[in-house]
Image (tube, rainbow, N blue to C red):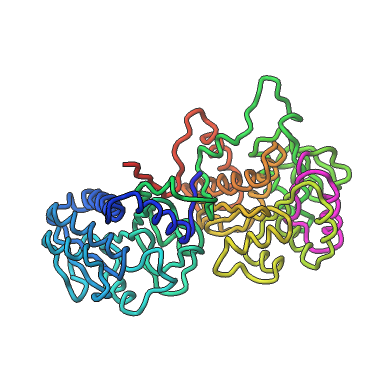
Amino acid sequence: MRGAWRVSDVRAAEEALMKTLPDGALMQRAAAGLARRCALLLRDTTGGVYGSQVLLLVGAGNNGGDALYAGARLARRGAAVSALLLAPQRAHAGGLAALRRCGGRLVDAVPSNVDLVLDGIVGIGGSAGLRDQAAAAVESVGEEPIIVAVDVPSGVAVDTGDVAGPAVRADVTVTFGCLKPALVVGPAAPLAGQVDLVDIGLGPWLRGDPAIEVPEASDLADWWPRLTPTAEKYTRGVVGVATGSATYPGAAVLSVGGALAGPTGMVRYAGSAKAQVLAQYPSVVASERVADAGRVQAWVCGSGLGSGEEAAATVRAVLASPVPVVLDADGLNVLVDGSMADWLRGRQAPVVVTPHDREFTRLAGSAPGSDRVGAALRLAAWMNATVLLKGDRTIVATPSGRAWANPTGTPELATGGTGDVLAGLLGSLLAAGLTPERAAVAAAYLHGLAGREAARHAPVTASDVAAALRPVIARLTSPSVVASPSSLVVDDE
């Protein structure tokens, strides 16, 4: 598990660390890691540093200083390094002098021939959106050169991941000491490209909890329920699925498919799509009502129920049970008028809700807005439920104030029915004994991987995602778990 830290926490850690180091040493550590990454990129694209054309986009302050010192190191290795100063009077004096000593030159416009661009315009102290001069310079760069962002892509809101104006779209972001929220959540995260985390010794000085946690494959492998020689279907957990209807039987089939891919030993279905579910999955024990379903360790409820009294009765019956509940889709819509508030408040067992943005807006009374993590945390506290806010970087938030960002999502999952599969898998994980937050984090992570797997073969359907869960889970739970498929690289040198 990796953490992403707010700007204030990073600043405090940097100040504490710098008191133990010679003056300027921390910037030199950052510049060395940055130059090393750039050199590797140039080796792979142009054959090496020597003779390559490097442009530095340099703003005011330390972010520009990191870029200038890194440029000096590349110039010493034979690169032709140019620097475009966007705030000449406030450029980092030491970095600028170092670049000049190594043969770097200042330019007034973006050169026509550039192999690699270092974005040192605005660091973690900037606010969202580039100023006009910087935005024009970035636009002049075009799409041909490799763009490397220094710490974060310039123009993003670092603590929230919002992008309120022009911003740099990087191929690689070299970030120092720890991840920042904009690298893992919101519309800013895709702008970061591949994220390379360079160790500069900051870790021991970071205090408190990270703003956001990012799961890795090894975390899920550790959490996954292990079968013992005495295991049988009931000890593995039984998940109940109350989804679908005569109008929307596919929702039942898909959510059951997601549940069957999980670690539980049995799936019980309750609903009017009983015939369709049994036709697809004969191992399921099916009934037409929640009251007749039998004992379960968790319920999945909502998708495809519709909006009438029958749907509301199903939700009430599920909430009356003493086991964890996943509420999805129509199960969330039933909550909007407030008539279920007492049912939710009176529950002792956990609730996990899985809204997309429109459902979130109906539940919370306003859209998630620019701070998706903050919005999810507020809803979790208000509902006293774990919130899985679906999106490109799905967020899991708990009433206690912890938040996770899922690194495996793909736009290919933006198709009907994939949320039903996710809810079914989540319910299976709950029934197998995972805590609500771990179940939600694991379900989102695996669902994202399954979306990627399905996209390798054809345009994705929800059925493809359900089918892809099994090989994805098999690889995850194999004795040797590979590194996380997120675009995160850690440099411990």
Q: Nearer the viewer, residue 314 or 341?
A: 341
Left or right for 277, reference 219: right
Residue 298 spot, x, y in % from top left? 76, 43
- Tell me where residue 153 appears, x and y as whole percent: 38, 63
Residue ranking furthest to the front? 19
Q: Is residue 159 left or right of residue 235?
A: left
In the image shown, does 297 or 161 lie closer to the viewer? 161
Residue shown at 59% from the left, 53% from the top: 403
Q: Quarter of the image containing the C terminus?
A: top left
| Residue 486 placement, left or right of 432 | left
Q: Is residue 312 magenta?
A: yes
Q: Residue at x 19, y 76 (%)?
A: 108
Residue 439 magenta-drawn?
no
Q: Quadrant of residue 54?
A: bottom left
Image location of residue 166, percent across then percent down: 40, 73
Q: Position of residue 148 (x, y in %)?
A: 31, 59
What segment carries the magenta color? Answer: 297-325
Q: Is residue 435 left or right of residue 115?
A: right
At x 60% / y 58%, what residue is drawn? Answer: 390
The image quarter containing residue 98 is bottom left
The image quarter containing residue 222 is top right
Residue that lies at the very extreme toward the bottom in this rendered image: 132
